[in-house]
Amino acid sequence: MKADIRVALVGNPNTGKSTLFNALTGLNQKIGNFPGVTVDKKIGYTQLPDGRRAEIIDLPGTYSLYPKSRDESIVFSVLAEKATELTPDLIVVILDATNLKRNLLLYTQVADLKIPVIIALNMIDLSKKAGIDIDINKLAEKLGVPIIPVSARKIEGIGELKTAISYANKFALQQESIDVCALAPGIIESISKEIDTDNSYFALQLAHQHETLKFLTPAQSDRIEELEKEHGFHSQKAQASETIARYNYINDLLYDTVKTPVTAHDESISNKIDKVLTHKVFGFIIFMGILLFMFQSIFAWSEYPMSLIEDLFVWIEGGLRTILPAGPLVSLLIDGVVAGLSGVMVFIPQIAILFAFISVLEDTGYMSRVTFMMDKIMRKVGLNGKSVVPLIGGFACAVPSIMSTRTIENWKDRMITIMVTPLVACSARLPVYTLLIALVVPNRNVWWIFNLQGLALTGMYVLSLVSAVVVAYVMKFILKSRERGYFIMELPVYRMPRWNNVLFSMYERSKTFVLEAGKVIIAVSVILWVLSSYGPGNRFVNIEKKYEQPQYTKTMTPDSLIRVISTEKLENSYAGVLGHVIEPVIKPLGFDWKIGIALITSFAAREVFVGTMATIYSVEGDADRIDSVQDKMRNAKNPNTGGPVFTLAVAFSLMMFYAFAMQCASTVAVVYRETKDWRWPAAQFVYMTALAYGAAFLVYNLLK
Amino acid sequence: MTLEQLGVGETGIVKEFTDLEMSVKLMEMGCLPGESVRVSRIAPLGDPIAIHVSGYQLSLRRFEASTIILQ
């Protein structure tokens, strides 16, 4: 889509930037990624009053152009890089009217880049309520830029902002703020000559940030490095004196334009809420309550829509089977593509519900209180206060939880959280555990009230959380980080959630998951379909010929014939062959080749275990019924010993394997999508498989 | 004394910083020399702390607070 003018939105976090973006663009937006990083690139379009079309880019919130995280480093590179498809014609800086002083720091930095700029003075309604008196005309005159008062939340002033965008100049008219050249005289001049720019502040920023900027050639970057040494440039000292100079300018600016009462009204209400929500005792109780409610809701509310989606796909499959002639292509379409698609879509309810909660928690300002309360405990194990939500969400499903780690600004903390979240016992493990526990653990009570089966299941859940914490602790020492761990964080004033934003977030996250992770999941489903529906040589043809003989067709019902054929086909398929191939490897864990097949097919999703077991043991009747699968498994005999295959040792060994192994194509896909580097999911796969193998080996040999 | 030594509700005025890297970030967030800071609360487990500075609430770890010297 071609736009007539490109506008970048820049502002501090918690200034209502996303709300303003949504108010300007409505549903007319798309989300991508900035090249090479996992920062959402939100681009939207809006019609200006003069009929032109404006493209609006929402840049990550930041307190200054000097980045504290990888997300923030995007801001300067987008604003500074010339003539790309993102270079803005105009910058709209959003300032929080209730906290002008701190907000103006970023404005003065952006203004010095000499790109045309206008100011959207947001939360003007709240600042009036708090008794802050801003002389907008005088401030605009002093800055030399238009200031448009808006309330993004109440959708006030949006029309005026669009008009201002359409009238915006092609040339930067803002007043000089500070004497940039005085900050580092020699080097600014040298870099300006080297890079051929007449903007001193741009040259100064290059001195600070040249190592991370992709638009500089290595030769340019090396040259800047040399110049720094030549001039004795010290980045942090220069930043410190720049910040002080800017605040001096801002104080002058606000001296006769803004009058603030001694205590702001809004803060005191927020203070009262904080007294309860971060209370020594109630704080934790309320937080636990909220987590429990979230966790329950993800389970309970998603159950119905999930079964609807499943039914829909069953209906589609049935429909396709009647319309289309049977054959390998149709089977690929139905059992490979449609089944894979169903495996993707079924996650949507859980993703949408988790993000509805997270969006409310972030919007209200509660999430930063969670970080505030949990930081001390979580830091000890190498995590972050914000890691609590993904970890607990992991009990429902690792996929949305890993997507939610974006709220963690610190790169190392976020990576560790992503790496350990799949260890938490997700809902897909539940059918595997219940099947195996019911098989080998007697259903009776101990110590009067505790049911043995329930205890075993609880044990698996506790084990998952403990293992996640222990692995996080180990990774804390393995992962190297160049970023220093800061915890300097704003605790924003409590606000009501914006329901529009909640809906946007649910829609966006689901869409991103389907479009990006969906590709990988469908590919894996198709590969697994090929593995289990084809066999080497003409084994399949031989099986069909064998069962065409009268001793089978005469003695068996058509139903049981189909069942026996599909069992024998699975045994002879590539998956079956692979099962035989890996048998020597999994034998020390007590698994035979049949279990090997289940391990392979479970890679699509763990719950496939039950279905595969049903096919392998040719379960009669409804294969989805767990009891009938159980009976077959209980009666399965080990040909070598004559005893049952599923002994206590084998069942627990198998549970250990499912507890630790990364058997989920969706998680692998989503970890790739969130880290943008195949090495992360690969490392995760390797360490989890090693852990699974070790734990299963240990348990099998202890219980044998 | 440092900011870390203040109790809840106590106020001080920032004089200087002992850690240059930290000071750059703190100053960007409005925590500048000459600015008045008040400890508004301490996290339930004793760390981090929340301070009131230049019109809003900022949370920081005790170690970070100990790099801020008060007048």
Image (spheres, coloured by chain):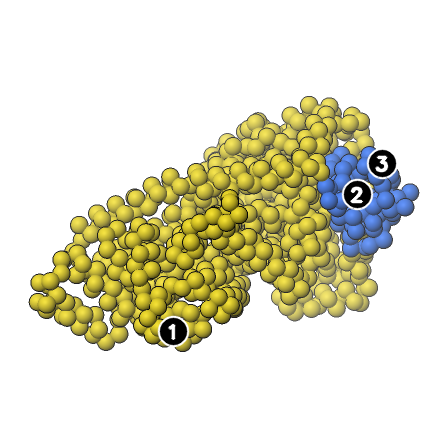
Chain colours: A yellow, B blue
Q: Are marks 2 and 3 in contact (CB under 8 Å)?
A: no
Q: Which residue is mark 1?
A: A583
Pick whichever of labels 2 and 3 is earlier in the sequence: 3
**Residue A440 showing in the rendered view:** yes
Which is closer to the viewer, label 1 or label 3? Answer: 1
Left or right: where A685 falls relative to A379: left
**Residue A669 showing in the rendered view:** no
Quarter occupied by residue A177: top right
In front of the other: A200 or A354: A354
Residue visible at 67% across and 64% down in the picture: A477
Residue visible at 25% across and 64% down in the picture: A567
Depicted B50 relative to depicted A695: above or below = above
Q: Chain of mark 3?
A: B
Q: Which residue is mark 3?
A: B10
Please state the horizontal and vertical placement of residue A366, each as a whole percent of the image. 63, 37
Residue visible at 80% across and 47% down in the picture: B65
Circle 1: residue type:
Glu
- Determine crowd level at label 1: few under 14, some 14-19, many 20+ residues with C-alpha closer than 10 A: many
Q: Are marks 2 and 1 in contact (CB under 8 Å)?
A: no
In front of the other: A470 or A120: A470
Q: Chain of mark 2?
A: B
Give the Cα distance between marks 2 and 1.
64 Å
Quarter occupied by residue A411: bottom right
Q: Which residue is mark 2?
A: B31
Say what secondary structure mark 2 lies in: loop
The label number, if any, that marks residue A477 in the structure image? none
Say what secondary structure mark 3 lies in: loop
